[in-house]
Amino acid sequence: MPSPTPAPQVLAFDVFGTVVDWYSGIAREAQALRPDVDGGEFALAWRAGYQPAMRRVMAGELGWTLIDDLHRLILDSLLERFGMTDLTEEQKQHLNKAWHRLDPWPDVVAGLTRLKTRHTICTLSNGNIGLLTNMAKRAGLPWDCVLSAEVFRAYKPDPATYLGVAKVFALEPAQVMLVAAHQEDLAAARACGLQTAYIERPAEFGPLQPKDVSPDRANTRHAKDFLDLATQLAC
Amino acid sequence: MPSPTPAPQVLAFDVFGTVVDWYSGIAREAQALRPDVDGGEFALAWRAGYQPAMRRVMAGELGWTLIDDLHRLILDSLLERFGMTDLTEEQKQHLNKAWHRLDPWPDVVAGLTRLKTRHTICTLSNGNIGLLTNMAKRAGLPWDCVLSAEVFRAYKPDPATYLGVAKVFALEPAQVMLVAAHQEDLAAARACGLQTAYIERPAEFGPLQPKDVSPDRANTRHAKDFLDLATQLAC
């Protein structure tokens, strides 16, 4: 696929689903706490609350809220449905931080290490800085810096986030590439002038919900995983 | 010296003077561009404009301004005095980015690597995120994350910066330690409840302006350099 623009200087990565496997991580921690709960179903339900919760913030219904706090609001709303109302406050806080303890997909650390040799690599996630930093430290993700909705006081797909990355590095939008496993995230970045790379993560929603990972020609790159992207970018 | 509080979870580092040697770096780049200029005097003059420029922002006289842009304002005001008015725009932009290319003190990379094993290590600098990230990438500074005045929309010594670090990591102020070579920065952090570590950097202002590096008992730690701090914190 021909690249329409010069190589990007900065690669900004979506995190949940693109870098880390939230489905397996949340399912595992829920089931460790409560062996009778269907961990996969619980993970899908928790994640499904994420977009609506962010929309409430963006609509002004909730003030600016960190994802840690949105995760807790959603968790509290799920406890009855999953028969977990008797968790202690300490258990709830621990479970809420399972999002800090997600594992990366197997190609991620090696891929980022290669990509970092020729590019500045940063996160661009709706996750808060503390969450992303704790996750990176535990998983060994070698970010050059951690950028987040928290820095820009706006969630993706608000243009302030994509354009914010370019502004932080005093670059043109086309010198930044968003790397994500979600076409709608990439489309919003493209509308701001960023380059885009789609990453296939067919198991993002677990084994029972296979994901459409077919290419969209509008993206600058389409890669199987981060190692494939590194090869395509000659890293 | 007895530690009044438990070991800090997060170490937040001042950068200019504490982590990197701005005097030598700026002097070297100015002199490379103009061999007839006294590089050391130029470095001191440029740095001396820094606090007054930030005060203009904090007083509301200038809107929120990134340090890259403040550095440029100060540089432009110095060109005549140093006989550099004939620099091209490209040369001025390159010289302004000398602050991105400063070298760390010799103990820094090894010290941070040790400290990182038991603590989350981050910057807390008035420098902007892009500057700090470019500097870290060039110098191999292994930050867990890059925090900056830019994140908190306030410069040190505004309490919003010191308390902002604690808030990012959902910690009490006393679980964060500011590490700096400047007593006034440490005093402001202490007033917010942070732990503090003073680092001796006797050569910060070059060979002609020796610096008082005597201990202040109010600090939690007083260390010769980052290796000494790592030893004191059992890293």
Image (cartoon, coloured by chain):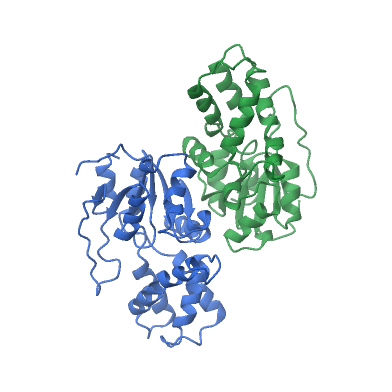
Chain colours: A blue, B green
Counting from the top left corner in percent of width and height, residue A197 is at: 29, 50
Residue A16 lies in quadrant: bottom left
Mark yes or no: residue A182 visible. no
Counting from the top left corner in percent of width and height, residue B155 is at: 66, 46
With B174 as the anchor, is A9 left or right in this view? left
Placement of B33 over or under B221, stated as above or below: above
Counting from the top left corner in percent of width and height, residue B213 is at: 76, 36
Residue that protrudes farthest toward the right in the picture: B217
Placement of A204 over or under B127, stated as above or below: below
Counting from the top left corner in percent of width and height, residue A34 is at: 42, 82
Q: Nearer the viewer, residue A235 or A166?
A: A166
With A6 as the anchor, is B17 left or right in this view? right
Q: Which residue is located at x 37 percent, y 77 percent?
A: A45
With A49 as the anchor, is B8 left or right in this view? right
Q: Nearer the viewer, residue A142 or B28?
A: B28
Q: Which residue is located at x 24 percent, y 67 percent?
A: A211
Placement of A231 over or under B93, stated as above or below: below
Mark yes or no: residue A163 visible. yes
